Image (cartoon, grey):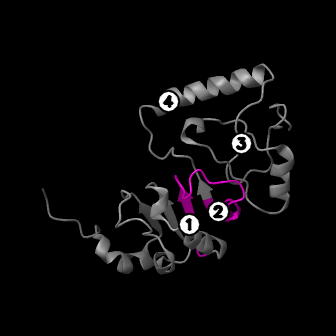
Amino acid sequence: MGAPRADVRPVADLELILPTADVVVLAVPLDPTTRGLVDAKFRKLMKLGALLVNVSRGPVVVTDALADGLQGGALSAALDMTDPEPLPPGHRLWSCPNLLISAHVGGDTSAFAPRAKTLVSEQLTSWATGQPMRNIIPTAHAHELLDSGQTLRCRYDEYEAAQFRSHRWIGASRCPRDASSGRDVR
């Protein structure tokens, strides 16, 4: 095993590293030492405009501290899980700028592809037979969000991550499907 890399630092050096890091990726287990690791102090130590990526468990991040930083424009974030999870409708994270929320798809596993295929098949069957599709953002609500200047985000759970035509991620200009019919409204 060679000499340690100079650019790899221990957790004890976080206070020295955070002010210089453009991207901070959390890939830690959830245990008593990591629960609430990203709190207000951690967030304030981060470089202005830095990106926080959480591929750990939701409770590693103190949600309110993160939301404060996002709403204040101090940072951006990409979360593969949240606390609470699932994130309830109306939760303040949904209205935060500079945030991408995915749905436990950061860790591609051997189980993902079969689940994705099943979901896509079910969605296409529902659409083709005129049955309601799952996870649809009602068109009126999507347009209301977009008209208010907020970014449209979609939230899935890990079994529903493959749904692709009925949602748009950050930067969407309009919601392409009508929730009541599942038909394209463009």
Which is more N-terminal, label 4 or label 3?
A: 4
User: On the picture, is 17 further left or further right than 91?
Assistant: left
Query: Which residue position is annotated with label 3?
Result: 167
Residue 137 location, quadrant:
top right
Residue drawn 59% across the image and 50% down it? 86
Sort mark 2 into few (<14), some (14-19) or many (20+) by Cα contacts within 10 Å. many
**Point 73% across, 37% down: residue:** 166
Q: Nearer the viewer, mark 4 or mark 2?
A: 2
- Quarter of the figure that contains the N terminus: bottom left
Please provide percent x and percent y for residue 132: 77, 29
Tag 1–tag 4 contact (CB < 8 Å): no
Residue type at the position of mark 3: His
Q: Which residue was labeled with disc 1?
A: 63
Quick one: label 1, few (<14), some, or many (20+) residues within 10 Å?
some
Check disc 2 and report the residue beneath it: 93
Relative height, residue 163 to residue 79 (above, below): above
